[in-house]
Image (cartoon, rainbow, N blue to C red):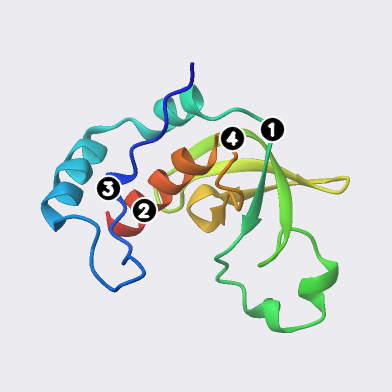
Amino acid sequence: MKKDYDTSWDIAESENGNLPHDEGTFDKIYAKWKKRSWESWLRGNLKFPFLVELMEDDDDAYFTDIAKSEPFRLGHVMKAINIEMEDDLYGIILKVREGRRVGYVPLCDVEVTSKKDENYWPVREYVTWFANR
């Protein structure tokens, strides 16, 4: 039986503008994340393949017609195939497929858009940790 993910670490504001918990909860969870071997943990918790959307991209070509026709650009949906490696600068690198093309994108730049996908919370947890490291 699959256990529901504990979202208590998520410090996003609620609809009424109040935090759902105190910031101490996030601090405790973050301390645990700092000790985590992310590549190993993700290999054990992600179920491949799954769909991701590229939500961050330092490439300014997004604002040109190239972004629409070239694969692996901001706003594109692609299939995550596997974890390729861990990079010192970009963190975990995913091997992805868009159409017939295979490429590589940092996990910290993608999002699993469906909260019903079992990979949503592990990816979100990593992205949150990476942004706050």
- The reply, left or right, for residue 106 in relation to residue 38 is right
Tell me if residue 18 comes above or below residue 122 in the rendering. below
Q: Is residue 129 above or below residue 70?
A: above
10 Å crowding of disc 4: few (<14), some (14-19), many (20+): some
* Label 4 element class: strand
Residue 45: give x, y in percent of width and height. 48, 27
Q: Decide which of 46, 6 is in the foreground and name it.
A: 6
Check disc 1 and report the residue beneath it: 49
Give the numbered dot on residue 84.
Answer: 4
**Residue at (69%, 32%) from the top-left corner?**
49
Which dot, 4 or 3, sits closer to the camera? 3
**Camera-side mark, 2 or 4:** 2
Q: Earlier in the sequence, mark 4 or mark 3?
A: 3
Amino acid beneath label 3: Trp
Q: CA distance from mark 3 to mark 2?
A: 10 Å
Marks 1 and 4, Cα distance to the nearest angstrom?
Answer: 13 Å
**How far separated are the C-alphas under marks 2 and 1?**
22 Å
Judging from the image, what secondary structure is the residue with disc 3 in? helix
> Which amino acid is tagged 4?
Glu
